[in-house]
């Protein structure tokens, strides 16, 4: 199955089932995370490397918003949903990277 997935590139590897608390402050990621919350959809966490982003990442879901600031910043608690994916296409839409993904458990 192939679907589109918004990406959150980080200098960390998210392992299946692992928690990942983050402070969201960049406008494009505040927008992306807000949309994921509103639509109850996952997003991909992919490791940033010197030569670009890794081809394999892990999907994540937001389990709670610990704090939301007046300027839109958020402190989120996320965990991996345990699905690994292979990015087959990377596009940019409204300053957010989106990947076509093929999932496997």
Image: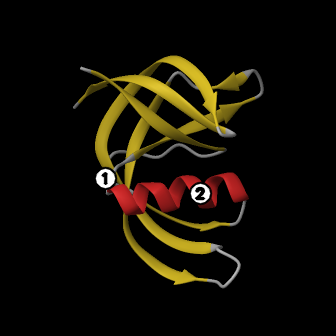
Which residue has dot 1 on it? 17
2 is higher (above) or lower (below) than 31 = above
How far across and down, in percent of the image, does residue 39 sit?
35, 55
Determine which quarter of the picture holds residue 61: bottom left
Task: Name the foreground residue: 1 vs 46.
Answer: 1
Considering the numbered disc 2 on the image, is that residue within a helix, a strand or a loop?
A: helix
From this viewpoint, which residue is outermost toward the top? Answer: 88
| Residue at position x 77%, y 27% in the image | 50
Label annotation for residue 71: none
Which residue has dot 2 on it? 31
Q: How many marks?
A: 2
Task: Name the foreground residue: 8 vs 29.
Answer: 29
Left or right? Give the position of 13 relative to 77. right
| Residue at position x 48%, y 81% in the image | 66
How far across and down, in percent of the image, does residue 67 sit?
53, 84
| Residue at position x 70%, y 66% in the image | 25
Circle nearer the N terminus (2, 1)? 1
Determine which quarter of the picture holds residue 74: bottom right
How far across and down, in percent of the image, does residue 27 sit?
71, 58
67 is higher (above) or lower (below) than 36 = below
105 is higher (above) or lower (below) than 86 = below
Q: Quadrant of the C terminus?
A: top left
From this viewpoint, which residue is outermost toward the right? Answer: 50
Cα separation, mark 2 vs mark 1, equals 25 Å
Considering the numbered disc 1 on the image, is that residue within a helix, a strand or a loop?
A: loop
């Amino acid at each position: 199955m192939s679907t589109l997935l918004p990406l959150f590139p980080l200098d960390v590897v998210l392992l299946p089932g692992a928690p990942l608390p983050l402070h969201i402050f960049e406008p494009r990621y505040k927008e992306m995370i807000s949309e994921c919350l509103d639509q109850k959809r996952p997003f991909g966490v992919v490791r940033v490397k010197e030569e670009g982003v890794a081809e394999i990442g892990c999907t994540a879901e937001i389990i709670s918003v610990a704090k939301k600031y007046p300027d839109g910043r958020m402190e989120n608690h996320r965990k991996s949903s345990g699905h690994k994916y292979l990015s087959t296409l990377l596009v940019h839409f409204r300053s957010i990277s989106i990947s076509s993904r093929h999932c496997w458990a």
